[in-house]
Image (cartoon, rainbow, N blue to C red):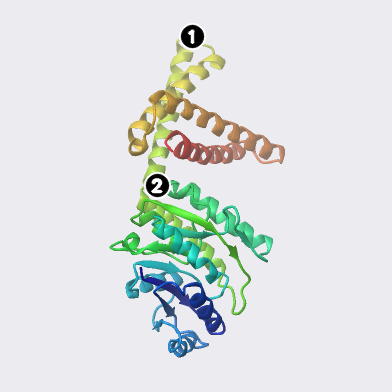
Amino acid sequence: MRVSIIVPTYNERENLEELFSRIDNALRNYNYEIIIIDDNSPDRTWEKAQELSSKYPVKVIRRVNERGLSSAVIRGFREASGEIFVVMDADLQHPPEVLPELLKRIEEGADIVIASRYVKGGKVENWPFYRKLISKGAIVIGRVALPKIRDIKDPVSGFFALRREVVEGVKLNPVGFKILMEILIKGNYSKVVEVPFTFGTRLAGKSKLRGKTMINYLRHLYRLMKWEGEIDRLVKFSVVGLSGVLVNEFFLWLFVHLGLSKEIAVIPSTELSIINNFIWNDLWTFKDVRKGKLWERLLKFHMAALTGAIVQFVIYWVLVFLGLHYLLANLIGIGFSFIVRYIVNRHVTWG
């Protein structure tokens, strides 16, 4: 099978000769092409790539009026002639020696193979603590926000291989750098494999991580959540939660007027509000992802409610201890409780 190596570039001139040489050594037994998509680099990366095309199977696309890594990858998909696509950076932090392992896993039946920093055997070299924290934090947020990728350890990797059919006919419109996440949400595939690799030290050029990159990542997540229906689901969960408040208040009033003490009346009124919320969430919010037995979901829903209550009380007590007004502390606790309950229910009760 023909392999298309798609490499977006911007000011990577100094890395190209070593990159092409190492790709060629790694893929001696493969029919391959390298597609360079360069955003009109000031250091004339595109010109150097064109020079090297006399020695290596390189196709150069110079984009003058477009910018962005993800859009460059999409352009590479359109230009590629191979049955297998590989996406990698030109900065040599993605070692070409890993390419045979990625292709081997494709040949064994995987649709997408991710070179992962975070599976056993993978690692990152010479990153400061804050870079590791940002990377891990972004992955956790993504896996929580998008249940479809929750089992993937490195859904934001920039080094991966896939079959052409995974993206053929798929409308991709990512924001920022993380095109793999878009493919994992929208692509046509059934099997994903992660293989470990060591994310190396950049040999030349500058890192493109900026504050705007992180903002774009959050924008991208929001768009994918909306596309997946997770934003609508969150809104429905909120509406159901408000209905539970009304149910709780009504039955608390009713039981007190029927003669129960206020201390006792809160127990059945709370339970009835939990049952109300469960019924509406089961029939409406999460109806498309229901699995298992009804009583099991109901039990898990109670556990989620208990977890949320514990979080609310702990945050309330801590903030009050720190001197915050008790009503504001309670509102903050309720907010965190809502987030926790939604996450637990989305990933456990209706996971």
Looking at the rendered image, the quarter that the N terminus falls into is bottom left
User: Which mark, residue 230?
Assistant: 2
Q: Where is residue 33 drawn, in percent x and y?
A: 40, 77
Q: Is residue 109 above or below residue 306?
A: below
Element at label 1: loop
The extreme top residue here reads: 259
Which quarter of the figure has residue 76?
A: bottom left
- For the residue pair 104 and 175, the one nearer the viewer reads as 104
Looking at the rendered image, the quarter that the C terminus falls into is top left
Q: Going 45% across and 83% down the picture, which residue do you hit?
A: 56
Q: Going 41% across and 82% down the picture, which residue do you hit?
A: 57
- Of the residues under marks 2 and 1, which one precedes in the sequence? 2
The residue under label 2 is which amino acid type?
Glu
Q: Where is residue 307 drawn, in percent x and y?
A: 56, 32
Q: Is residue 327 above or below residue 124?
A: above
Mark in the foreground, 2 or 1: 2
Which quarter of the figure has residue 254?
A: top left
Q: Where is residue 2 drawn, in percent x and y?
A: 36, 71
Q: Going 40% across and 51% down the picture, which residue do you hit?
A: 191
Q: Is residue 266 above or below residue 170?
A: above
- For the residue pair 280 and 176, the one nearer the viewer reads as 176
Is residue 6 at all visible to an observer of this figure?
yes
